[in-house]
Amino acid sequence: MAARDKNRPPVHPGEILREDVLPGLGMSVTKAAEALGVTRQALHRVLAGTAAISPEMALRIGKFCGNGPEVWLRMQAACDLWHAERRMADEIAGIKTQRAA
């Protein structure tokens, strides 16, 4: 398996839902939102990548997809960490790593 290019951001989990899951199910955003018990607007923000997958949303999506919440939270964490590392690179570079005596 090829290694992921570290210069490219991980895929936002909403993109997986938008591009793979919903089309695979032949389901509209409105119907998916109803099935998930959330507003269409809340789901749309996730699908657009403008809202993060919260633990609550991960529980809903994990049940909906049958693969559990952990996979959705891991995808979101990978996205968040990638962006934070780039945003904070200079600040983090100035922090000295401590070692126990």
Image (spheres, grey):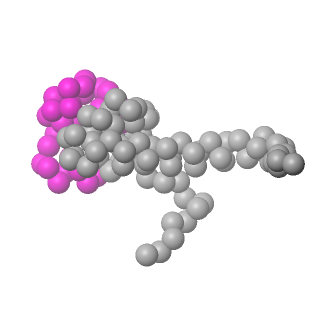
Q: Is residue 43 magenta?
A: yes
Horizontal arrangement in the rendering, residue 36 relative to residue 93 (left or right): left
| Residue 12 visible here | no
Apparent side of residue 18 relative to residue 4 in the rendered image (left or right)? left
Q: Residue at x 37, y 45 (%)?
A: 70
Nearest the viewer among 6 and 71 is: 71
- Residue 99, given in percent of the width and then of the height, sits at 82, 49
Q: Observer-nearest residue: 22 or 76?
A: 76
Q: Report the side of 7 relative to 24 (left or right).
A: right
Based on the displayed image, in which of its 4 quarters is residue 51 positioned?
top left
Q: The magenta stretch spans which residues?
A: 19-46
Q: Main secondary structure of the magenta part?
A: helix
* Frontmost residue, 89 versus 30: 89
Residue located 19% across and 51% down the image? 23
- Quarter-of-image position of residue 43: top left
What residue is drawn where x is 21% and y is 46%?
65
Work out whether 3 lies above or below 67.
below
Q: Quick check: 31 above or below 82?
A: above
Give the image location of residue 71, x and y in percent. Answer: 36, 49
Count of all numbered marks drawn on residues in the image: 0
The correct choice, above or below, for 4 with respect to 45 in the image is below
Q: Position of residue 93 (x, y in %)?
A: 80, 48
The answer to whether any part of residue 36 appears in the image is: yes
Using the rendered view, name the quadrant where residue 5 is placed: bottom right
Please state the horizontal and vertical placement of residue 33, each as a whole percent of the image.
21, 31
State the quadrant of the N terminus. Answer: bottom left
In the displayed image of the protein, which residue is found farthest to the front? 101
Is residue 73 covered in magenta? no
